[in-house]
Image (tube, rainbow, N blue to C red):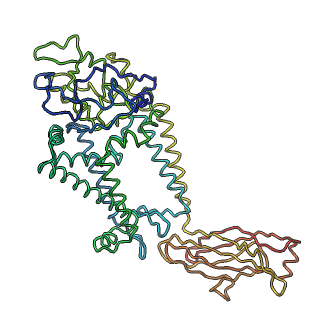
Amino acid sequence: MTSSDAGASALDPEGRTEGRGSRPPAPGRDGGAPGSPRREVAPGIVQHDVEAINARERRALYVGRKKIHPKRARGTFRTLKWIIMAVTLGIYYALPWLRWDRGPHLPDQAFLIDFANQRLLIFGIEIWAQEFYFVTGILLLAALGLFLVTSIAGRVWCGYTCPQTVWTDLMIAVERFWQGDRNARLRLDKKPWGFEKIWKKGATHLTWLAIAVATGGAFVFYFRDAPILMGEFLDGTAPTIAWVFLGVFSFTTYMLGGIAREQVCIYMCPWPRIQGAMLDRDSLLITYREWRGEPRGPHKKGETWEGRGDCIDCKQCVVVCPMGIDIRDGPQLECIQCALCIDACNEIMERVGRPRGLIAYDTYHNVDAGEDVSQRRVRLIRPRTLLYAGAMALVAVLMLIGLAARTTLEVNVLRDRNPLFVRLSDGGIRNGYTVKILNKRHDTRSFRLSITGLDGARLAALGYEGQAEPRIPVVTDDLRAVRVFVSLPADRVRALGRDVVPLRFVVTDLVDGTRAMRETTFRMPKR
């Protein structure tokens, strides 16, 4: 089965793998020699000499890549894509440079993945390594949100906000800037290597590399203070690991966005093979309305539109598609729901005086209803979407409860395992522990360490000799480990008559009285 076969099977809930109303395309293929005969399909509109990638009539198990030269589209959805590209790229490049005052001696980068201190800083929220379940919650929300959006409108994440799509759009815009629109790029590719081809191709790839380096650099800034690391890059003193990852991220951006392009979406990404499980008959998908478009064919000036479809077979929908497919072949794995074919088709419909919407976001239910307006519907609220929305709400509530219940003080106790206990010269027993106190506040605090649950026991901490309940300072956002010994006199050992006794360590904030406790055990010789 080819990728398009698999896509049709996955996307159609009724298992209809055949495209609707397709016609064999005109001879030639994308990248063919410009200037070859092209027929006029309507006054002032000629048919493009282009073959859809992996068209239904010519699918093969193994085929070499055919380079796609997307034509620039104009319209509502193309404008929306430009806006989303500007917003997402702006956020990506600007976020590491935003500042957020957390107090003295703390990073002031608004978003920082702080590996050195094992924490994630997101504006006023700090997520420590032991709180990684919050990151899991964020990923769950993102996944469920993707499921919800897909069940409503198909693969729109891929078409508008996926990083691969955003950077590929940017790279194609650069290519178009230096080499011209589709026809000009086709002519340039067919020319022998000369000055014009070298400088235009060279300028394109140099610009791609500059974008890739900026992209890789911006991503590295998420892991260390951006102004400091930028200065280190400029004077050559940045850590080796920063240079390595800058190179890796730059290379992958250049390759995936500039060179591989649609191959990533078709072959590398697993999402198109998964999304079919989230679709149903009421999911809005990019759809060619066969009932209105067929039979298709050229239309001459003065001819009636009676007894024929609105599609004039101009193939504008094919040449603007970044995946190189023909949406008239029906649902396909390659389609990323970017809707550029809608913009292209709407423009043609206006030029030939026909209603817009021959290609549109529509559902299988409405396609089957055809011209029967009474049967058409759009159901955004249905069991599938309610399930995903409910799951998102549940995860969000659990995360909010977890955030609200977070403490600013945590304590962990590790008891010595070798030896389990030490017998003292007076017959008493001593156990050793390592007490770790985590101060999540943005100022230095002092904490009192005490024990409960073991009458007669004495507490001693290294560095705090002579203090029955040592007072331990911990600087802001830091973990302090203290070596502690608990001793039990001989008479209390005999009185207990057990080899394992529960013990509780209590850490108290001396400023506001916040307490944190940790249960452990006190070990003695077996009776």
Up/down of 314 relative to 89, above or below: above
Viewer-proximal residue, 502 or 205?
A: 205
Residue at the limit of the structure toward the bottom, as seen here: 466
489 left or right of 131 in image: right
- Quadrant of the image occupied by residue 416: bottom right
| Quarter the N terminus occupies | top left
294 left or right of 364 in image: left
Q: Looking at the picture, how far across and down is residue 356, in whole percent? A: 22, 26
Q: Looking at the picture, how far across and down is residue 219, in whole percent? A: 36, 60
- Quadrant of the image occupied by residue 364: top left
Q: Looking at the picture, how far across and down is residue 154, in whole percent? A: 39, 35
| Quarter the C terminus occupies | bottom right
Up/down of 251 relative to 153, above or below: below
Q: Looking at the picture, how far across and down is residue 26, in whole percent? A: 22, 23
338 left or right of 490 in image: left
Viewer-proximal residue, 324 or 16?
A: 324
Up/down of 317 relative to 269, above or below: above
Q: Residue at x 27, y 21 (%)?
A: 24
Q: Residue at x 71, y 75 (%)?
A: 451
